[in-house]
Image: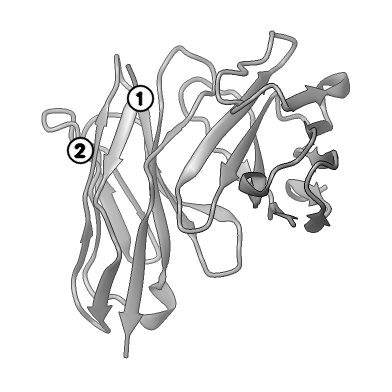
Amino acid sequence: GAGVSQSPSNKVTEKGKDVELRCDPISGHTALYWYRQSLGQGLEFLIYFQGNSAPDKSGLPSDRFSAERTGGSVSTLTIQRTQQEDSAVYLCASSFQRGGHNEQFFGPGTRLTVL
Amino acid sequence: GNSVTQMEGPVTLSEEAFLTINCTYTATGYPSLFWYVQYPGEGLQLLLKATKADDKGSNKGFEATYRKETTSFHLEKGSVQVSDSAVYFCALSPANTGNQFYFGTGTSLTVIP
């Protein structure tokens, strides 16, 4: 596709339920990132996939959060037993490594609301 | 380690005013530096970038110069418009560490007519 796509665009769920957020990166991009943006806050790094390397999970806030990337392309971020503080916009980005000039392309985000 | 510090907001300016949003960084080696912009209701998009010292990135009337001596990448525009109202994020990508990015906390700009 032309850009990074994410689905759903909006998700409302009840506290305690599990949710899955999907990201389709730009074809051929080797790196994929998940960020969280809470209301009025900056970008909080969650996880980073680079090619076939083990992902950098250092930003995941708790063990309720996990992510996978299948076939080096599509990624799914899963939040188990959601809490109200998980409400945020979840952003996905992808990039193609070419030396140090690595622009990230962002998707439109998924707005998650936990009631 | 690697980090980005940018000017706290929010910033409110009148149309045609001069804009500066400060950004300083800490990094090893020679990172690439970026400014991203997030317009209301939209996703982040790249505004400009610079990949080596003394480079000047420019786009849409915005400019930023990569200053290694002061480890800065301040964003400037000579005459802002209402349509420039957005949140601006400074970011760096360290050299030789894959594609990891480090973002500042963002600076909200509101331009009033």
Q: Quadrant of residue B5?
A: top left
From what the image shows, is residue B55 above or below residue B60? above
Question: How many neighbours does mark 2 have within 10 angstroms: few (below 14), some (14-19), or many (20 or more)?
Answer: many
Which residue ends up furthest to the left in the rendered image? B69
Distance, label 2 to label 1, CA atoms, is: 12 Å
Amino acid on which disc 1 is placed: Pro
Image coords of residue A35 (percent x, y):
59, 38
Describe residue A11's horizontal placement relative to residue B95 as left or right: right
Q: Secondary structure at mark 1?
A: loop
Which residue ends up furthest to the right in the rendered image? A71
Residue B13 vs residue B81, the one in the foreground: B13
From what the image shows, is residue B94 above or below residue A103? above
User: How are the colours assigned in the image?
Assistant: one colour
* Mark 2 lies on residue: B72
Chain under numbered label 2 = B
Chain under numbered label 1 = B
Q: Quadrant of the C terminus of chain A?
A: bottom right
Looking at the image, which residue is at 54% across and 33% down? A45
Image coords of residue A67 (percent x, y):
76, 26
Q: Quadrant of residue B109?
A: bottom left
Image coords of residue B83 (percent x, y):
43, 78
* Mark 1 lies on residue: B31
Question: How many neighbours does mark 1 have within 10 angstroms: few (below 14), some (14-19), or many (20 or more)?
Answer: many
Looking at the image, which residue is at 61% across and 26% down? A60
Residue A93 vs residue A66, the one in the foreground: A66
Describe residue A18's horizontal placement relative to residue A97 as left or right: right
Please tell me which of labels 2 and 1 falls first in the chain.
Answer: 1
Q: Secondary structure at mark 2?
A: loop
Amino acid on which disc 2 is placed: Ser
Residue B58 vs residue A76, the one in the foreground: A76
